[in-house]
Image (cartoon, grey):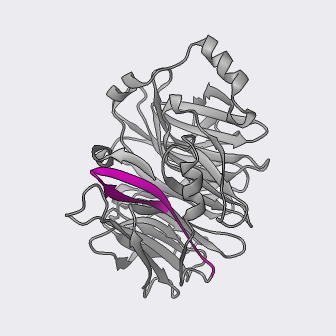
Amino acid sequence: MIKQYLFVAFVPLVSFSLASTACVSFPSKKSDAVRAATVPEEMHEHRFTAKVSFENDPNWNVRQMPTESSIAFERLQFVDAVTGYAVDGKANLYKTIDGGVSWNKMKTFPGSSISSTLFPTEDIGLVATHTIPDSSIGGENALARIFRTVDGGNSWTQVFEGRSLGIDSLSVSKSRVVFAAGSKSAVVDSVLEWSPLFISSSDGGTSWNDISGGLIQEFERGNRINGMPTDIIADDNLVTVVTHHGSIISSDDLGKTWSFQAGVDRQGFPYSVRPLGRSKNGELLLYGASSSMDHGTGSFVASWSKAAGWKIGLLPRYFLSDAVLLSSGEIVAVGFVFKDGLRSPKTNIVLSTSDNGQNWQLIRESGPENSFNSISRLSEGNVFVAGDEGDAVVLERS
């Protein structure tokens, strides 16, 4: 297990104190050269500051949705052009069958927060929840549960319960094996011990098997892996796990054994790293937040392959809340930017890039009161973007 002292457990994962950057050291150009000569090719990094054009992209049409909902969307997934599911910060699950014009509350999970959702079809879905009892110290008594529906969210059955700090990702492979990943903890002699949680289901989520053993072994093999699992990409037999701090671990036998592939250099302090999918060239695409004394605080979009290593496009002062990879290879992201420094008012934005994060084009911007938090593919070339107070738009590629 990976040991951390108790006070670490109370540091929010998605927040970052600028004062903590003073403890991070950065190598000189000389030490960079030494490092480049000794680090494997897959660990090499090419970092650059991405370019952003604030001229509205004429290739996108923005259609305001006439929704009357006051939902503060936090997570969003459309199954097709008309059927979609969304969750808010109060453990409520909503459904639309008219392309997002109206939303109906389908289920509330009391005393919990929703940590992950997966809807392979319009009728079949899985929701992972997370509950921390008031008596829990550092989360050692926290419970993760998975609920399943087969009738489009009208009824739900609990199919899994276990000690966990949260199931952060649900994914299904082309062979219909479902995977879930997160972390679990226990307090031993006043020390909080963390370990990865990895479970699978071969019957569509009805029953689950804990196959964490191989992943735990890879975590304990050395100090190369940073952070707990937060996301899964499941291909045929290849399963890839990405951790909170950008480490990549893969398995070619459906989770029995694992091997470390690469990790974003911790000099940039990456966190909240999420995979987008694979590019047409097979590169793994990711995005996340970072903070460094060299580049400041903001977000990044990165690509990685064993052959090319890392290519990391930095977006100082930009904070991406969510992003989606389209079948065309284009990435569309939502978030906000502090145009005139971190003390200036924020501007909410929707951006796109067609070259894996090197150049970005503005699609829409708005004032600080209209925040967009989540994004989902609607249909080929169309994207649904949602935010606070039910504000939503559809982006149509012209």
Q: Where's residue 158, x and y in %?
A: 42, 83
Q: Name the residue located 69 percent from the left edge and 30 percent from the top edge.
A: 44
Residue at 55% x, 80% y: name it: 205
Q: Is residue 60 left or right of residue 350?
A: right
Task: Measuring from the top left, give residue 328's x and y in whole percent.
Answer: 73, 53
In the picture, measured across the screen, residue 255 lies left or right of residue 336, that is: right
User: Most extreme residue toward the front, as rendered?
Assistant: 189
Tell whether 164 sits left or right of 236.
left
Residue 219: where, in percent of width, then height? 55, 50
In the displayed structure, 223 sits above or below 1; it is above
Q: Nearer the viewer, residue 17 or 135?
A: 135
Q: How many marks?
A: 0
**Which of the 4 image quadrants contains residue 213?**
bottom right
Residue 343 visible to an observer of this rendering: no
Tell which of 255 and 326 is nearer to you. Answer: 255
Q: Is residue 188 magenta?
A: yes
- Between 272 and 211, which is closer to the camera in this rendering? 211
Region rendered in magenta: 182-202
Where is residue 80, by image quadrant? bottom right
